[in-house]
Amino acid sequence: MKSFKVLSALLSYPTPALIAAAPELAAVLNAEKLLPSAQRRAVETLIAEISAGDVYDLQERYGLLFDRSKTLALHLFEHVHGESRDRGQAMVDLKAMYENAGLVIAANELPDYLPLFLEFLSTQPLPSARELLGQTAHILSALAERLGRRESNYRAIFDALVAVSAEAPRREIVDELLKGIDPDPMDFQALDAAWEEEEVRFGPGAQGQGACGHEGLIAKLRHAKRAAGAAPSPR
């Protein structure tokens, strides 16, 4: 589905080419109607903001959100495994899934980068894409809430992805992901402290798990679900 490619483009670093292509992106979403109407209108608001924006302002705002803030990282396994060794195996498994589907990624791109993941989903049958997307739904929902706190229109992309996922996020898992400190991107001291904190790890270690394909991605992402399910509910 081309709609996944559109969302991938919108989550990429703003460039003059993206600004110029913005009207075409909206047209694709309206033609496919993969996104529910409410989510599609919200994404169109973001598209309008990008198409009318100054490229340098757009780039600065993008950097403040996704590059400077660890809690808004666009790398999926950052929110599940942090910098633990489990993340490395998860990367290997995800890269293998891409390659088995004929998608070759650039050497400087990490497999769990969300725009790349969405690019991959655009090549898959819709039921498979929705199933895979569902395994990330709790992460996407947490990111949507954090973006909402910042009153960012980028939230629309994450809300839209959750809406088309085959599996709805469980509230207790989202709450678990939201427990960490979420510093102001302009508070450099707080940001430095957040980056220096010990990584939070969800679930048991993945040593010995070498699964590839869909099962590999699902197993890695479900570490978070098992851990959150065992934790007491927040009062």
Image (spheres, helix red, strand yellow):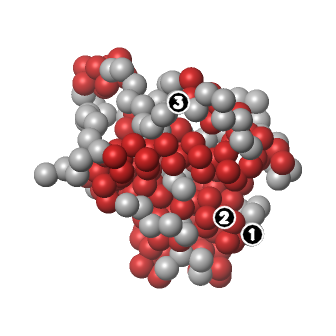
Looking at the image, tell me whether mark 3 or mark 1 is earlier in sequence order: 1
Q: Which mark is residue 125?
A: 1
**Residue 210 figure quarter:** top right
Tell me where residue 38 appears, x and y as whole percent: 42, 79
230 vs 86, nearest the viewer: 230
Rendered view: 47 above or below 220: below
What's the residue type where badge 2 is placed?
A: Ala
Tell me where residue 166 appears, x and y as whole percent: 55, 69
Residue at point 67% right, 72% down?
127
Tell me where residue 234 appears, x and y as whole percent: 19, 50
What's the residue type where badge 1 is placed?
A: Pro
Q: Are marks 2 and 1 in contact (CB under 8 Å)?
A: yes
User: Mark 2 packing: few (<14 Cα in 10 Å), some, or many (20+)?
Assistant: many
Q: CA distance from mark 2 to mark 1?
A: 6 Å
What's the residue type where badge 3 is placed?
A: Gly
Q: Is residue 114 visible?
A: yes
**Residue 105 figure quarter:** top right
Q: Is residue 155 visible?
A: no
194 vs 87, nearest the viewer: 87
User: Mark 3 packing: few (<14 Cα in 10 Å), some, or many (20+)?
Assistant: some
Q: Which mark is residue 205?
A: 3
Q: Label 2: which residue? A: 129
Rendered view: 64 above or below 23: above
Q: Residue furthest left?
A: 235
Tell me where residue 71 appears, x and y as whole percent: 37, 38
- Judging from the image, what secondary structure is the residue with disc 3 in? loop
